[in-house]
Image (cartoon, rainbow, N blue to C red):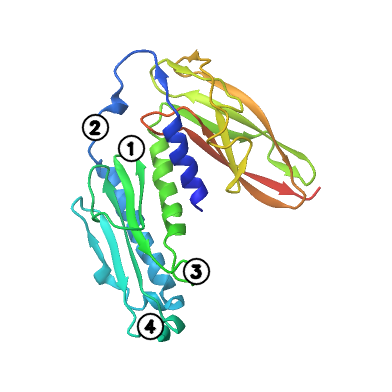
Amino acid sequence: MRRWFAAMMILAAVSSVFFIPMTDSLSQEMAIEPEILEISNKIMQDLFAEIKAAQPEFKELANFSDENFFKNAQGIYTIQYQYTPKTEGAEQMQQELPYAMGITIDGLDQWTFPPRKKMFNYGFPLLNVKISGYQEKHPIRTQFDINPLVKKYGQILADEQQKLMPLTITVEPTQPSFSTREQVEVDIILRNVSKRHMYVRPLNKDTLYFLIDDQFWGTKPTEGAPKEVQSILYSGEEIHMRYRIGVFQQPQTIHIMCFYRMGISGVNPFGKSEVSIVKP
């Protein structure tokens, strides 16, 4: 689960983008827009509902209630919860264990939770927000894990952020479906959807990075330093590259994410697609 977030963070750190000189509005400091506040609150409400639904399965969620759901200083819902077992010592290890979690969506420069161990922060700079929180659980014993929900709802913010990007990446399968043992091919399309002309790097193994069903494919974020070979991609234009993804032996649906290693205000363009593998 952390692989997706790790890819996003590493790519942001090692990438840069170059524009034909003009004012870069993306770099200007932004307040949280009302639409993003609304999306953030919907995310937190849905996340709260999922935790409540999981409550019967986990002893440590026994006391989780509406009292653990409130708004932070930015007006965004926040979840904060702590469970302390009544038993102690060896008896505790056989029964229940302490647990704590907190999660919210903050402005980039705001902090609902003070610094502490086990904190996480995943930023979305073009939206001027971050998912911020912490979780304290036993490293071995099975307890409720907030991380899959962080990934699930973080993807919603990541998708929303892509709408503000001047460059977009599209992943288009070359046919509606592929048979088992048939080579899967996709077209990667880089488009300049802004009103500006931009310097871009070519589409190749050094500038593209893939996750297929959340697994690395091709180069990884830390491999293949992009060469400084640039060309101008004019407003409204696009460039293409066809990739062979591989052959699959079983019918299934594969999920592809393609990242382009050129950061814009710390954000990398990415595209997603699903490919159906069917029996011949």
Q: Earlier in the sequence, mark 3 or mark 1?
A: 1
Discs 4, 3 touching: Cβ within 8 Å: no
Relative to 278, residue 66 above or below: below
Discs 4, 2 touching: Cβ within 8 Å: no
Residue at 41% across, 86% down? 91
Give how far across and how far down residue 247 sits, in percent. 75, 42
Neighbor class of circle 2 (other Cα within 10 Å; few <14, some 14-19, many 20+) is few
Q: Earlier in the sequence, mark 1 or mark 2?
A: 2
Query: Which is more foreground, mark 4 or mark 2?
Result: 4
Q: Earlier in the sequence, mark 4 or mark 1?
A: 4
Q: Earlier in the sequence, mark 4 or mark 3?
A: 4
Residue 143 is drawn in which quadrant? bottom left
Neighbor class of circle 1 (other Cα within 10 Å; few <14, some 14-19, many 20+) is some
In 3D space, how far apart are the residues under numbered discs 2 and 3 (Cα atoms)? 42 Å
- The residue where tag 3 is placed is 140
- The residue where tag 4 is placed is 89
In 3D space, how far apart are the residues under numbered discs 4 and 2 (Cα atoms)? 51 Å
- The residue where tag 2 is placed is 29
- Which amino acid lies under the numbered mark 4 shown in the image of this protein? Gly
Helix, strand or loop at label 1? It is loop
Residue at 30% across, 73% down? 65
- The residue where tag 1 is placed is 125
Q: Earlier in the sequence, mark 4 or mark 2?
A: 2
- Of all residues, the one furthest to the left in this rendering is 73
